[in-house]
Amino acid sequence: MIAESRLRRVGVVLAGGVGQRVGLNTPKQLLKIAGKTILEHTLDVFDGHPEIDEVVVLMAPGFVAEAEEIVRRNGYTKVGRVLEGGASRTETTWRALCALGEQECDVLLHDAVRPLIEPRIISECVAALERYEAVEVAIPSSDTIVVAAPGPRGDIIRDIPDRSRLRRGQTPQCFRVSVIRAAYERALADPEFPSLPTTDDCGVVLRYLPDVPIYIVPGSEHNMKVTHPVDVFIADKLFQLAENTAPALDEDAYRAGLEGRTLVVFGGSYGIGADIVALAKGYGASVHSFSRSQNGVRVEDVAAVEDALARVYAETGRIDYVVNTAGVLHMGKLGESGQHTIEETIGINYLGPVNIARASVKYLMETRGHLLLYTSSSYTRGRADYSLYSSTKAAVVNLTQALADEWACQGVRVNCVNPERTATPMRLRAFGDEPAGTLLSPAAVARTSIDVLLSRLTGQVVDVRLNR
């Protein structure tokens, strides 16, 4: 419920573009990056942000049904309306403002094709709207900007502005709705407006309501706009490298998400797996743990994995979450590794997740459940003496992203946790005692793992780092 002391906050996702510069004949916001459409990535942030009360989507003409299906499939609770956009950005924004009605509110207008928007930026925009009626998100220009003018054989430099005062505008652009509506009413009444170079909403306010100050919230280099073909590649890589985090939940959320649910943990006899088992049981989940030492279940044995899941399903009638923390770390040069070491590393670290994924998907489809895997920071670049370990962990990341894409239509989420160095028995065997305070605790990783299980994330690598 919205407190009476504050205005309603509406995120308007402007998804009216078609994507001609990307070389598409369908909207670029429906292009998949990192396992999900660009629109889904953007809606994930706005729908999941605690300071946003409502979300309105303006979709490209002819594609409203596709956007409505995305909303339905993901269960977005704050998306109240999906409306058809106009032929231009101006017309699309005006349709959004008209749809918001006469009641005063704060509106955050965001390009759908900026899918890497950070929750921090939204929070700072919301805070700024308590003091200002117009807010722009911008970052300093890292490049020298030149002003060009026509010359006898092409453009020549006319001026080089002081770079220290230049900013690159991003979105969201945020306003008291009465202010941005008044600016647009004046703009649309101006016969010269269609020919003006104004391309964004803050530009409309600056021109038609010059006495309204526009505050600048610091943006992010990652908050890029997917416009050209190379942007698709860059955005995909940024999603892979981003330090994704799951929202930390309170006690009530843990209880609501776990009580009466069934959780299966492979590798649950010690370390992170054992802490996940204990934590989930404490919040009322029916938890079933399997491991080689505990009950003879080896993840590289597909029959054993299938049998374990079948027994759990027969007992409980449902499987909501499947977690695999089983892993093995053998160090040494590849040429000096024995065949047993090679087969064990590949079997446990990669074939195991594959077996678990194949065997669990039919159960997770019934509950629209979640598969959680684990990687290591070494997945980003192979290192000497870690060739088998780091390559299998990189494979798990690719598996996560691929399965999230494959299973999206069935509502099954797949994510991968990437803990920093953690004080597990496996690490102790490999490295011996290490200085206190330099390692994560398995309990901390377990709690973040539960946060991820209960989140809407899918296809993401979620980092868990030591707070130093």
Image: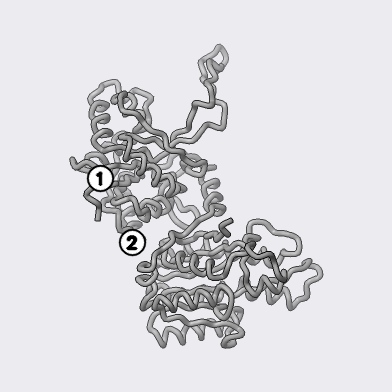
Q: Do the residues labelled 1 and 2 touch (CB within 8 Å)?
A: no
Q: Element under label 1?
A: loop
Residue at x 52% of width, y 52% of height: 239
Front residue of 437 and 357: 437
Give amino acid for label 1. Leu
The answer to whether 101 is drawn above or below residue 187 in the figure is: below
How far is disc 1 from disc 2 in space, using C-alphas?
A: 25 Å
How does the figure colour the protein chain or chains? one colour
**In the image, farthest residue toward the front:** 436
The residue identified by callout 2 is 75
Q: Residues within 10 Å of mark 2 (few under 14, many from 20)?
A: few
Residue 273: image tag: none
Residue at x 58% of width, y 75% of height: 271
Q: Where residue 412 sits in the image (x, y, percent)?
A: 42, 68
**In the image, farthest residue toward the right:** 336
Q: Can residue 366 be seen in this view?
A: no
Q: Where residue 81 sits in the image (x, y, percent)?
A: 26, 51
Q: In which quarter of the image is residue 91?
A: top left
Q: Can residue 344 be seen in this view?
A: yes
The residue identified by callout 1 is 7
Front residue of 217 and 263: 217
Q: Element under label 2?
A: loop
The quadrant the N terminus occupies is bottom left
Q: Where residue 320 sits in the image (x, y, percent)?
A: 41, 75
Image check: 80 left or right of 420?
A: left
Q: How crowded is mark 1: few (under 14 residues within 10 Å), some or many (20 or more)?
A: some
Image check: 32 left or right of 179?
A: right
Mark 1 or 2, nearer chain start: 1
Q: Where residue 331 sits in the image (x, y, percent)?
A: 74, 69
The answer to whether 304 is drawn above or below residue 253 in the figure is: below
**In the image, farthest residue toward the top:** 152
Residue at x 18% of width, y 40% of height: 102
